[in-house]
C-alpha cells in the first residue's frame, strides 16, 4: 500500500501536538479526486481545532481546510491527470482528512481548475483558495458591495483583510481599514486603503469624526470582541458582516440585540462552504494577480516538516500576511 507524509493531530494542545507521520494514500472513488498537494494555506479555524474548540472534529485527523496541487487520479473523468486544481471547505480537514499532507481525496464537485498556463509559483497559489473565497464571498454575497460605496475593514492587516481591500478597490469602492500597529499603515495603503484607523478596541468615535454618516458596509474580521463597536460604524441602511474571529472569542458573554444593533443597520455573517467556494471566480482573480492588478500579501512560507513552527507563527500573529506551507 502506498504511503504519504501527513501531519496528524491526535489530541488538542499546542503546536507540538502536530506530528509528521506516514499514513496510507487515500484511494478515490467515482465522484472523487485524488490531489497531489503542492501547497496549502494556514487558517485560524485550524488553530481553534488544534486547541480543541471544534467539537464536531474528531481526532486523529489531518487538518487543513484548503489545498492546491495537481490531479493524481479522477475515476469519474471530471478532470485530467496533471490539471492544476484548488479545493477548500466542505468538510475538508474536519469531516475527512485535509490539506496538511502530500495527498488528499476530495469530492469532484468541490474542486476548481486553475488555468494550467499560470506562471504563479506554488507559494502564491497556496495562499489563494480560502483567502479569496472569504474575501470575495464576504464582499459580494453577504455585504452586496457595489461600485461607489464606502467600506470599512476591521482587521485590515489580516490576509483576508488585505485581499478584501485590494478586491474592493478594484471594484471602485472607497476603502478604509483598521490596524493596531501604526507601522502597518503603509502595508494597508499598498493594498488600496485610503484611510487607516489605529484600533485601540474602540474606533466608532474616530469613524464618526472622519465620516459622520458612517460607512455603507463594514467587514468585521476581528470578531465578537469589537463587533458592537463596529456596528456603530455603519450608516443607516448599512450592513456589517462578521467573517473572522482573529480576536479569538467565538461568542458574547452578554449580547442585547436591541441595544447593540443600531436602528436600520443590518448584521450578517459569512461562513463559506463548498458551494461558496465554487462561486468564487478563482480563475479570474488568479489572472488579475498574474497581471499585477490584484496584489496578494504572502506573509511567510514553510515546508511541511516545519508545521509546528508555522502554527506557532500563526498563533503569535507574526506572519504579516498569509502563511503558506509547501509539501
Image (cartoon, rainbow, N blue to C red):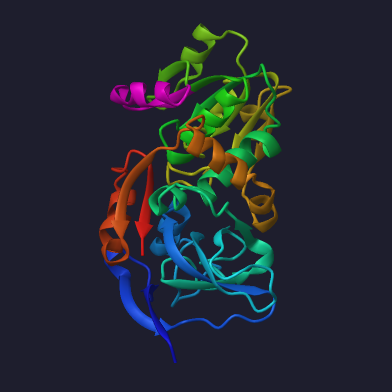
Q: Is residue 181 visible?
A: yes
Is 2 positioned to the left or the right of 320 in the image? right
Q: Residue 153 in magenta?
A: no
Residue at (61, 69) in percent of width and height: 80
Q: Residue furthest bottom?
A: 1
Which x, y percent locates residue 295? 46, 33
Residue 250 visible at all: no
Please tell me which residue lies in front, 274 or 266: 274
* Residue 24 percent across, percent down from the top left: 44, 85
In the rendered image, residue 66, in percent from the top left (x then y), is placed at 51, 58
Look at 46% across and 15% down and name the residue there. Answer: 195
Q: Is residue 253 depicted above or below 274 in this figure?
A: above
In the picture provided, is 169 more to the left or to the right than 8?
right
- Residue 241 position within the rendered picture, expressed as x and y whole percent measured from the top left: 62, 35
Query: Looking at this view, is 245 or 141 the one in front?
Result: 141
Q: Residue at x 47, y 31 (%)?
A: 292
Q: Residue most toward the front?
A: 117
Q: Quadrant of the N terminus?
A: bottom left
Quadrant location of the C terminus in the rendered image: bottom left
Report the span colored magenta: 177-192
Drawn side of residue 187 relative to residue 250, left or right: left
Residue at image position (28%, 43%) is 318
- What is the total number of numbered labels drawn onto the structure image? 0
The quadrant in which residue 132 appears is top right
Determine which quarter of the picture holds residue 75.
bottom right
Q: In this view of the protein, which residue sits in the foreground, 73 or 156?
A: 73
Q: Indicate whether 131 appears above or below 195.
A: below
In depth, the one of 228 and 49 nearer the eye is 49
Amino acid at each position: 500500500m502506498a504511503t504519504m507524509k501527513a501531519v496528524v493531530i491526535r489530541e488538542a494542545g499546542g503546536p507540538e501536538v502536530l506530528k509528521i507521520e506516514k499514513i496510507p494514500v487515500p484511494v478515490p472513488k467515482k465522484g472523487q479526486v485524488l490531489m497531489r498537494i503542492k501547497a496549502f494555506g494556514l487558517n485560524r479555524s485550524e488553530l481553534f481545532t488544534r486547541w480543541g474548540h471544534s467539537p464536531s472534529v474528531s481526532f486523529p485527523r489531518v487538518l487543513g481546510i484548503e489545498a492546491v496541487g495537481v490531479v493524481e487520479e479522477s475515476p469519474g473523468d471530471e478532470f485530467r491527470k496533471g490539471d492544476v486544481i484548488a479545493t477548500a471547505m466542505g468538510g475538508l480537514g474536519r469531516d475527512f482528512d485535509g490539506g496538511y499532507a502530500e495527498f488528499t481525496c476530495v469530492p469532484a464537485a468541490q474542486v476548481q481548475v486553475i488555468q494550467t498556463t499560470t506562471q504563479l509559483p506554488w507559494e502564491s497559489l497556496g495562499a489563494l483558495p480560502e483567502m479569496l473565497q472569504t474575501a470575495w464571498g464576504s464582499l459580494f454575497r453577504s455585504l452586496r458591495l457595489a461600485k461607489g460605496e464606502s467600506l470599512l475593514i476591521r482587521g485590515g492587516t489580516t490576509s483576508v483583510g488585505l485581499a478584501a481591500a485590494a478586491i474592493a478597490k478594484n471594484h471602485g469602492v472607497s476603502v478604509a481599514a483598521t490596524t493596531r500597529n501604526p507601522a502597518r499603515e503603509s502595508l494597508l495603503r499598498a493594498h488600496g486603503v485610503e484611510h487607516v484607523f489605529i484600533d485601540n478596541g474602540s474606533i466608532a468615535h474616530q469613524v464618526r469624526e472622519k465620516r459622520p454618516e458612517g460607512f455603507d458596509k463594514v467587514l468585521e474580521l476581528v470578531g465578537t470582541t469589537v463587533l458592537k463597536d463596529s456596528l456603530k460604524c455603519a450608516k443607516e441602511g448599512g450592513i456589517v458582516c462578521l467573517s473572522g474571529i482573529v480576536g479569538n472569542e467565538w461568542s458574547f458573554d452578554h449580547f442585547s440585540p436591541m441595544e447593540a444593533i443600531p436602528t436600520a443597520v443590518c448584521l450578517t455573517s459569512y461562513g463559506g462552504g463548498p458551494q461558496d467556494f465554487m462561486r468564487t471566480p478563482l480563475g479570474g482573480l488568479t489572472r488579475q494577480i498574474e497581471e499585477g492588478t490584484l496584489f496578494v500579501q504572502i506573509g511567510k512560507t514553510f515546508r511541511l516538516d516545519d508545521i509546528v513552527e508555522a502554527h506557532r507563527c500563526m498563533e503569535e500573529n507574526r506572519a504579516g500576511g498569509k502563511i503558506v506551507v509547501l509539501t
